Amino acid sequence: MTQTIAPRVRTLVLLLLAATGLLFAGAGPVSAHAAVTGSAPQQGAVVDKAPTQVSLTFSEKVALSGDSLRVLDPKGKRVDRGDPANLTGTTYAVKLHGGLPDGTYTVTYQVVSEDSHPVAGAYTFSIGAPSQTTVSVSGQTAGGGVVGTLYGFGRYVSYAGFIVMVGGAAFVLACWQRGAGVRALQRLTVAGWLALTTATLGLLLLRGSYTGSGKVGDVFDLDLLGQVLQTKTGAALVSRLLLLAAAALFIAVLFGAYEKREDEEKRDLTFGLAVGGVVVSAGLAASWAMSEHASTGLQAGIAMPVDIIHLLAVAGWLGGLAALLVALYRAPADTPVDALAVRRFSRLAFGSVLALVATGIYQSWRQLGSWTAFTDTRYGQLLLVKIGLVAVLVGIAWVSRRWTGRLAEAVVVKPREESDPVAAADAGVDTEADADADEKEPARAGASGSGSGSTSAGKGAAASGKKGAAVSDKADGESERAAQLARQQAAIDTARRKERRDADPNRFGLRRSVLAEAGVAVVLLAVTTMLTSTEPGRTEEEAKAATSASAADASSAGALTLDMSFDTGGKDGKGVVRVDLDPARVGGNEMHVYVQRPNGRAFDIPEVKVAFTLESQDIGPLPVVPDHITTGHWSASGVQIPMAGEWKVSVTVRTSDIDQTTVSKNAQIG
């Protein structure tokens, strides 16, 4: 039986590693949860006079620092002055020096969205006429690098620790109170507490560098740590640490004093532990709800309590599942988890699933906003994966429920303590035959040592004075040997009871189905962690709508905007390329090229080239190689259009060393 269990445990470990890989394969720089919906001057605009300030409008409130908004001249020198300030609502501005010369200026920003995630980006505008610029912001990222990876891992560990700690304690208190004395369950719950505490401390130290420079050396910067403590996220992490101190006291009472109490005292203590445990668990869940998605956006006052319930339901189901798995595999042979405990957990899990469905529907509506967001946004796609995993998990849980019913029926039909001496031994109950054997064993041992002594009593008495010491030593040796044999026999009996217990087909089937549940749950947790670090679909669609409106405004002012879909045929080769030409007239023009994935996210590719052809006059193609500005953005100034007409604009995009394609559109220029 041990040989069949070990491969399954190794399978669960491999699933854990695969889920962790999935988490970090999709991590990269964290997706921005606040998007720029407007700017003044606008992106790519050419203004006649130098503005006195640059302003950005975001989709939600953001947190600023002294370097959050920077404006750089064509040589890369800063031309902003003072700290950025909040103008109105979600609009923020920074003042500029006076008398700025003509040329192309770069605006960079790095802020923290209201739901705690860093946001970074850049764009250009020109004064008088476009010019060449030495500024390169292609490496501008937010929440990336080694620090970003460590922060993402810390988030995963913190969620896992919370689920295991809360779910393990709930399983013992609500389903199997005898489990309070099981060492394996104690270790599981304490491991959850240690994981959550360690991850929270790590997140607190990493936070300043994660939202700022991204340098590993800044992790232990005390000034940054002081700034973090003044933010909403910092306060949430500190509150979580204080609540973990209360959780440590709860765990100590549950696994220490609880098992030693009498039944009447246990009832009172159970009520107190239940109330205290719910309060502490809800407080820990609130430390996430009050600092992340639920704390901002639509109906935040309703979303935060719903998020708390959602997290508690996840912990009750998945954490309880982990505790049940440990109990089925690691509980001592004389303290097996019984059918009643499994049935209680089944009811707990069913209630948790109902709560998950109800709160999940509300959260999906709030974060997506439309049916199309399920397929058009990354958040929606991840949510579909999560829904599928939950459906698989519920299906496996239904199988586990059937095994639970069979196990309970087997116990009712044939009570082990009354009809099966072997089963009674499995449960730790001594049968009458065992008791008789235990009583007769010493008698037999005594008889074997004194059978011949009665026929030679005289001789033994005569020699007793000479050999007393030898007899004493021999008696001690026999006593030690008997104790050793007793220990060996006890170990053999325990192994036999465990083997017979594991041979129960109903229990074996339950263990397999619960192990499968746990494996799916590990992957589900990884997807959920990725989901909390992804821009909500509603925000992403609002940002795309604002970008389209801005492009429409630019088009109505005389600029030309062309959108062309492309497919290079290779892996990850589909996308949309947008060409903005301003003012789209004869002479010099400012050109911007934007490459996006089908879901609207910026798409960095190795090369973009543009060519203009006026076929009616046999002019062209006139090649233009734009400069790479930032992720998914290329720009070229002074693009010369020699005469008015219907020009063919061709764009060549290369997504790999061998995959490229050319798409084109005709447009009236001049």
Image (cartoon, rainbow, N blue to C red):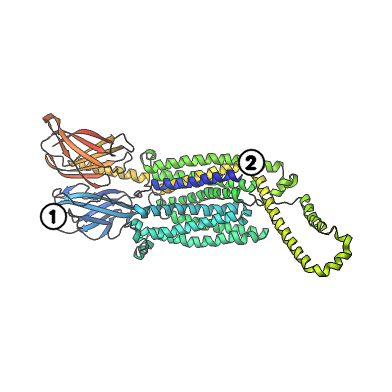
Position of residue 507 relative to residue 468, above or below, is above
Residue 320 place in picture, x, y as percent: 55, 49
The residue at the far bottom in this view is 465
The amino acid at mark 2 is Asn
Q: What residue is drawn where x is 71% and y is 49%?
A: 425
Q: Which mark is residue 623?
A: none
Q: Quadrant of residue 188?
A: bottom right
* Secondary structure of the residue carrying numbered label 1: loop
Residue 603 place in picture, x, y as percent: 29, 43
Q: Nearer the viewer, residue 485 or 326?
A: 485
| Number of marks drawn | 2
The amino acid at mark 1 is Pro
Q: Earlier in the sequence, mark 2 or mark 1?
A: 1
Would residue 645 be found to the left or right of residue 22 on screen? left
Q: Nearer the viewer, residue 609 or 2?
A: 2
Instruction: Provide the residue designation for mark 2.
Output: 506
Would residue 505 be found to the left or right of residue 107 on screen? right
Residue 532 place in picture, x, y as percent: 41, 49
Whether residue 455 is visible: yes
Position of residue 670 relative to residue 99, above or below, is above
Instruction: Provide the residue designation for mark 1.
Output: 101
Whether residue 236 is visible: no
Q: Tell me how far mark 2 sits from mark 1, CA to CA.
A: 82 Å
* Secondary structure of the residue carrying numbered label 2: helix
